[in-house]
Image (tube, rainbow, N blue to C red):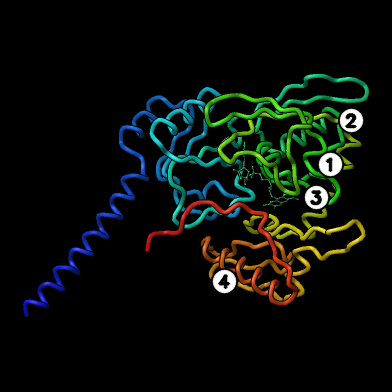
């Protein structure tokens, strides 16, 4: 009898310890009321607490951000970084969310989104054979395409139809087999987590296939592009068209999606011919496979679509299924192109 009581007391203690630990974890990671007040009263821009990130990602998936911030100015962005430093709060950078999967438990701390926030531009130089164009990081890529067209520069045509912000395209070195964003970058301006502004020339930018090597806490603030294919706006429009048409014909644009989920395996030497991630997925018989509300697109093997209120866990299950099957059948290890952020929900 006595022994039983001791055991149940220990059980209760363990339960209390567990509850206490979870509470402490929550206290540490969620924002204090003081910090929320400061943000509400003094942050120059949009502030939303407990904001579902499914509203801010292209695939319409993702749990809440403790605070979702859209700064109106660079000063406001610096202020957010200062607060994050002082209050020991983590922060995550988001553009349009076109290549980002947010887990169902959401993101702790600040999610700072520049998309359509810092979005101005300036023609720095225009001659008969080139145009230097500075664009802020939050500008939607679609608008940059229109500005370039109106200026009569055809350089960006192969990148027509890529959704995202300038900052996101540069951070991802977005592109196609025909061209990548790095081909046009002359310099880029960054904001460090200490609030320092750095301007780096292209020779100092470490672009790789679908990546720019830089600290993940650092913001791209603006980019200078050099455009050299000078034509008339009508000619540029004609050059842009087929690229968008190809997307409509080959990508499942009628559903929320993430773009290419996996990077294409790269050849180890010039003459090697390697299958694309989409081809590997198709050959593995995985097109059209559905988990929960997510499906591997029947139109394009490297796209996962949100067909019916999908959760991040559905998408991640499909990703792991494809990785495992392709590794087991071909030995190729697929690497994700998308960025996965946030945490799983507490069970
Ligand atoms: C239908 C569709 C088609 C696509 N086609 C292509 C394609 O042809 N080629 C291609 O390369 N991609 C493609 N993508 C993927 C996506 O469009 C690109 O990766 C784009 O660059 C993402 O920009 P974003 O602003 O949405 O970035 P997000 O998804 O918001 O962020 C991506 C990464 O960039 C970082 N980031 C964003 N902004 C900044 C900033 N200002 N400073 C520092 N880091 C930042 C984020 O922290 C994150 O790590 C496609 C996506 C979709 C949905």
Ligand 1 has an atom within 8 Å of the beta carbon of the residue at disc 3: yes
- The image shows residue 177 at horizontal and vertical percentages of 84, 51
Cα separation, mark 4 vs mark 3, equals 29 Å
- Tag 1 residue: 157
Q: Determine whether, in the image, residue 3 is placed left or right of residue 130.
A: left
- Tag 3 residue: 176
Mark 4 or mark 3: name the one nearer the start of the chain: 3
Mark 4 or mark 2: name the one nearer the start of the chain: 2
- Element under label 4? strand
Mark 4 or mark 1: name the one nearer the start of the chain: 1
Position above or below: 132 against 325 = above
The residue drawn where x is 80% and y is 32% is 148
Observer-side mark, 3 or 1, equals 3
The residue drawn where x is 64% and y is 50% is 99
- Element under label 2? loop
| Residue 291 tag number | 4
Observer-side mark, 1 or 2, equals 2
- Element under label 1? helix
- Tag 2 residue: 228
Position above or below: 298 against 111 = below
The residue drawn where x is 72% and y is 77% is 329
Mark 3 or mark 2: name the one nearer the start of the chain: 3
Position above or below: 46 against 62 = above
The reply to whether discs 3 and 1 touch (Cβ–Cβ < 8 Å) is no
């Amino acid at each position: 009898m006595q022994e039983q009581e001791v055991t149940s007391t220990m059980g209760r203690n363990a339960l209390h310890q567990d509850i206490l630990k979870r509470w402490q974890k929550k206290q540490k990671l969620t924002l204090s009321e003081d910090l929320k007040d400061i943000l509400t009263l003094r942050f120059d821009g949009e502030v939303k607490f407990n904001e579902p990130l499914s509203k801010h990602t292209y695939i319409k998936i993702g749990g809440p951000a403790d605070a979702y911030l859209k700064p109106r100015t660079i000063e406001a962005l610096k202020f957010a970084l200062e607060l994050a430093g002082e209050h020991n709060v983590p922060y995550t950078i988001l553009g349009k969310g076109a290549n980002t999967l947010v887990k169902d438990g959401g993101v702790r701390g600040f999610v700072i989104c520049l998309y359509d926030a810092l979005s101005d531009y300036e023609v720095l130089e225009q001659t008969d054979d080139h145009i230097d164009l500075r664009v802020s990081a939050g500008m939607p890529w679609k608008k940059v395409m229109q500005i370039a067209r109106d200026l009569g520069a055809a350089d960006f045509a192969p990148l027509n139809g890529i959704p995202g912000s300038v900052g996101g395209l540069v951070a991802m070195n977005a592109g196609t087999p025909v061209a990548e964003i790095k081909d046009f970058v002359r310099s880029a301006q960054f904001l460090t987590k200490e609030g320092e502004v750095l301007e780096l020339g292209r020779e100092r930018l470490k672009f790789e296939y679908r990546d720019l090597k830089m600290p993940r806490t650092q913001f791209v603030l603006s980019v200078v592009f050099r455009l050299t294919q000078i034509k008339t706006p009508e000619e540029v429009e004609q050059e842009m068209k087929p690229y968008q048409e190809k997307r409509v014909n080959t990508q499942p644009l009628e559903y929320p999606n993430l773009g290419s989920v996996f990077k294409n395996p790269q050849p180890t030497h010039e003459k090697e011919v390697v299958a694309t991630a989409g081809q590997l997925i198709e050959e593995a018989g995985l097109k059209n496979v559905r988990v929960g509300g997510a499906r591997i697109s029947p139109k394009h093997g490297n796209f996962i679509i949100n067909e019916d209120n999908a959760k991040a866990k559905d998408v991640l299950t499909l990703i792991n299924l494809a990785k495992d099957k392709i590794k087991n059948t071909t030995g190729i290890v697929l690497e994700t192109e998308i960025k996965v952020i946030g945490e799983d929900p507490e069970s």
